Structure formats: C-alpha cells, structure tokens
Amino acid sequence: MSFFKSFAASLLAWVIGVAVLIIGSVSVMVGALLSMESSQKPIEKNTILYIDLNEAIIDSPLCSPLSTIDAANLSVSESLTLVKALAAIDYAATDPNIKGICISLVNKDNTNIANLEELRKALLRFKSSGKFIVAYSNSYSQYEYYLSSVADNIVLNPEGGLDWRGVGLSTIFYKGLLDKLDIEVVIFRPTVCKYKSAVEPYFLTKMSEANRKQNEALANSIWNSICDDISEVRNISKEMLMQSARDMSIVFAEDALRVGMIDAVAHEDYMNTLYDGYGVERNDMGLHNTITFGEYASLIDCNTLTTSVGNEPYAMNSLVAIIYADGQIVDGNLYEDNSVYGSRLATELRQARLDEDTKAVVLRVNSPGGSALASEVAWREMVLLQQVKPVVVSMGSMAASGGYYISAPADYIFADNTTLTGSIGVFGMIPNINNFLRYRLGITIDGVGTSPAALGMSLLEPLSNEQKAFITKGVDRVYTTFTSHVAEGRNMSIEEVYNVAEGRVWSGVMGKECGLVDAIGGINEAIGKAVELADIANNYTIYEFVAPLTPFEEWLNSFGTQYATLLGLDFNIYGKELCSMIEEVPVVFTTQGIQTLHPGNLKIEF
C-alpha cells in the first residue's frame, strides 16, 4: 500500500511540476510580449505595408488560444481573421502614412485559395486609390503569382522561376489497403447520387467516370477563373496563359518576362529603386520604413468592427452579426477548432435572432458538411432567423453537402469563383472488421439478444438484410429532406433541384449558373448585402461571434487587449486546410450516422 501512496505522491508532484513549468513558460512569453507591446510605435510616415502572409488568414476566430502557442519553441503563431485582413487593406488605402504595398510571400500555406481570391480583390480596391503595389519573390508558385499579379511591378530573382502548370484534383483511395486487412465496407447512397464521391475511396481504386467528369469540370472552372483574373490585370491573353501551362514553357525568370507575366528580373535590392521611383522618402538611416501585415492589422482602428465573446450581450445599436460555420459539421453543443457542432451553431443563430440590436446576420460557411442530423438542427434555426431578419451566406473555400444544407434558407448567397459548393447528396458507410479480427488477430465475438437487432449495428459483425434495409430507408429519407429544403430555400422546383443535385460538386461560378448561388463575391460583399437588406447603411457595427474563454484563457486575456491579440486570443491558426492529402484516421472509421459530407481527402493542386 505504501508503494501506491508513494507512486501517487510522485505522480502528483510530477503533474504540479509540469503545471508550474507551463505557467512559468507562459509568464516568460507574457513578459516578452508585454515588452513588445510597450515598445510599439505609431505608424510612421512614408511607410510601405509588407504583405507576406506570415500570419495565417483564417475564417473564424479561435475557440482555444492555446492552439497558437508552440510550447517547444516558447513562441506564438499569429493569425488574422479574413474580415480583419480585408479591413486592414481597405484602411491602408486611405491611411496617409501608407504609401504603398509590397507583396513578398514567404509562406503560401497560410490561407486557402478562396481567401486568397478575396485578398486579391481587396488589393485591387487598394490599387484604385492611386497608391502603388509592387511584388517581389525569389521564385513564384502559381499560388503566389495569382495574388502578386495585381501589382504594378512584379520582380523576380534572376535565378528564380515561375511554376506555371494549371490546376489538378486528386484523391487517395483506401480500397486496396482495406482488402489486404480483410475489412469490408458496406456503402449506402441513393442510386441517383452518382456524383457523391466521398465514399469512393473505400470501394473503388480510382475515380468513377461520374466523379472524373465532375472533377474535370471543377478544375477547368477554377483554372478559367484564375486565368481570367490574371489576363485582365496583366493585359495578356488568357489563351497564352493556358497554352504556357500546357507546354510548361514558363520555367525561368526570362521566360516570364518575355511573355509579360513579370516586369523585371532583378535581386531584392532593386525594390529600393522602385520605392524611390514612387516617391517614398527614406528615413534618417537611409532606409524605407516598412510594417508587416500582422503589425499593421493590430494597430489600425476599424471603427465598424468589434469582436465579442460567448453569451455576452451585444453592446452596440445596429449590429451585423458574423457567425461562422468553419469545419466539419458534427453532433453536439461544444466549441472546438475546425468543427461545427450543430446544436452550438443553432444556439448562436438563435441568439442573433432574439437579440434586438442585431439587425442582420452574415453566416460565413467554410465546411465540407458532415452529420445530416446536426445539419438539420442548424438548418431549422436558419429558417427561423430568416423569417425575422435578413440573413446572408458568404461561402469560403468550401460550402458543400451539409455546408450547403445549412446555407439554403438564406435570403442571399455569395460564393467566390473558386468555392466548392453543392454536393447535394447523402451517404451511409459501415465497416465490418470481423474477418480482420478473426483471421488476422484470432479474435471472435459471440452474444445473445431478444431480437436479431438487439445488439445493434457493430463493426464486429456483418450487417443483416434487415439492418441494410433500415439504413437504406434512412439514407433515402435524408436525401428527400435535403432536396426539399434546397427547393424551398432557393425557390426552385424539386425537379430543378434534382438536376443540380445527385451529390455533384460545383465551383462558385458554376453554382451561380445553376441557381445554387446568387452572386460571386466575398465576405465584404455579403456584409454589404446584409446592410442593404436591413436598411442600416448609415449606422451599423460588425460583430464577430467568438467562443467563450475558459478560466485559464481568461487569465491569459487579463494581460491586456494588445497582448491578447499577440498571444492569439482574438484569432486562431486555421489548422490543416480542407484538402490535406491523407486524413489521420480515414473517415470510414470515424463517421457516425448518415452523412452529408463532401470528400475530405480531395486534394486541389494549384
């Protein structure tokens, strides 16, 4: 007994020691960041705003600030919500201290292509103010070049290159692995949902013809939009851009200069000559004043943007509430990064509906869908909200399947050109690991019950015919409900919905053409539409919903607003993007219930 007491005491001492170490480490960061806060200076005159996207551009504010702390390096990762990033660029257009912008990307993985599209539009608005935009890179990826193409002068290192090759979509298939493990996956989907490809990796070894057809259409739509945008600002033909990708003729800096994709081949110090040419005065040290995007966004005063938390009352008069559906839709009532809990989202929508000061709502959807039941719970609150207040949906990189389910009741839907949307379909998927256990591990299962179904559905036993019929009825019922909701919300006949459903995924451009989307635009356009519908253009404040903080997070937050921002209490690292090549755990073993889910391992190569 004394041994266990000794062990318990040692374990408790270890836990306390680790806690003290963590608190001490946080205190070190507190001191360092507070010293940074105290040393911050106002924006100087003749300053150049550097956009390098070191900060992750995310859709929704964070759930947990601890996700931004790298304990191993005692460092904090910075991030900006898209709303804040766009507001910073728009503010810079009228800021007399900002002379121009330099785009110099160093981390291309910190935002998705739809957010990049919205940042690009904000840069074009900035450019219309008469201020300059320049861009420099040692080497341009397509991703980097797309954003940089808005610049008046694009400069590339003499030994650098431009990776110009088009857009591709790929999927990993698990069927061969499952066969080797003697694991059977039973698939349930309506026969009409031939495009519902989320289940294909588990019973096929390559894309079905229907899936290949839709992916080719998606890739072509996204590539057309990108080439159209670049052609317009660079005054070079779309046909040349596409042909150059097909024959891979743009390799070196000289190739890009020859076709007009860049303006100069030079080293980075050449940028000082450009700044001088734009009349940017140097400081007393003979250098040009610069400020990073994250620093600038933390310093500016956006009077029309406020961020509040949890269940605190809305403190302004005419509010436009931004509510986020960011991540896979799951059942429950929790807050968690990269997940949309259906009951929690319903609660947020209900709060906005019942609050007298909230005059309109923008729902920002960046979701591949998920649980059909959780989607239904949120859908109902969307319907109730739309009956009493204007509600506008802004679709991010993906608003597909369950993401479209919750969007359908909105008064107006905006999508970016590159948004993946639609996927109006449903599936069920039950794996059976009985043979794996029996023949690979030597494990068998036995039991009794008052009826054949008494033990429920299990991964350990094959499904009976009655169980298969039961699931099939549920899948068909959800598809009927889903398509009916879309018909009602979009004022379409059920036949019109069937024509664009079947689980097919559309780009934003294609979604507008087939009636699933009202207009191409980003979150700024969605806010503008909400303001218009609510008739509050002369007096409104934007409100971003933020999850309530835990007591420990409140303690961190007590160090001050500026420190809270630096530590990540206002913004969250978005985590892995929607198209991570390999899921940590294949969805076949983690999904519960009937799903309205877009394929999670679809990889967009750009």
Image (cartoon, rainbow, N blue to C red):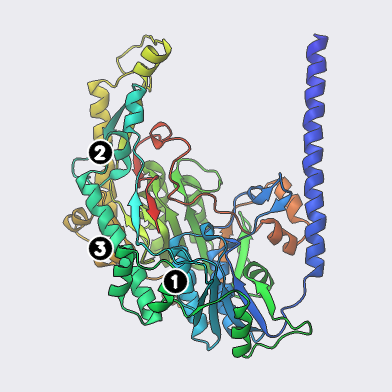
Amino acid at dot 1? Ala
Q: Is residue 146 left or right of residue 507?
A: right
Secondary structure at numbered mark 3: loop
Determine whether 233 is above or below 573 in the image.
Answer: below
Secondary structure at numbered mark 2: loop
Q: Residue 55 at x, y = what percent?
A: 60, 61
Using the numbered discs, state the Cα–Cα distance from disc 2 to disc 3 in whole angstroms: 26 Å
Identify the mark nearer the N-term, 3 or 1: 3
Task: Name the residue beneath numbered marker 2.
Answer: 189
Residue nearer the viewer, 53 or 258: 258
How many labels sit on residues?
A: 3
Determine whether 45 is above or below 518 in the image.
Answer: below
Q: Residue 288 at x, y = what percent?
A: 69, 81
Which mark lies nearer to you, 2 or 1?
Answer: 2
Task: Name the residue beneath numbered marker 3.
Answer: 491
Which residue is rendered at x = 68% and y = 85% of the image?
46
Using the numbered discs, state the Cα–Cα distance from disc 2 to disc 1 in whole angstroms: 37 Å
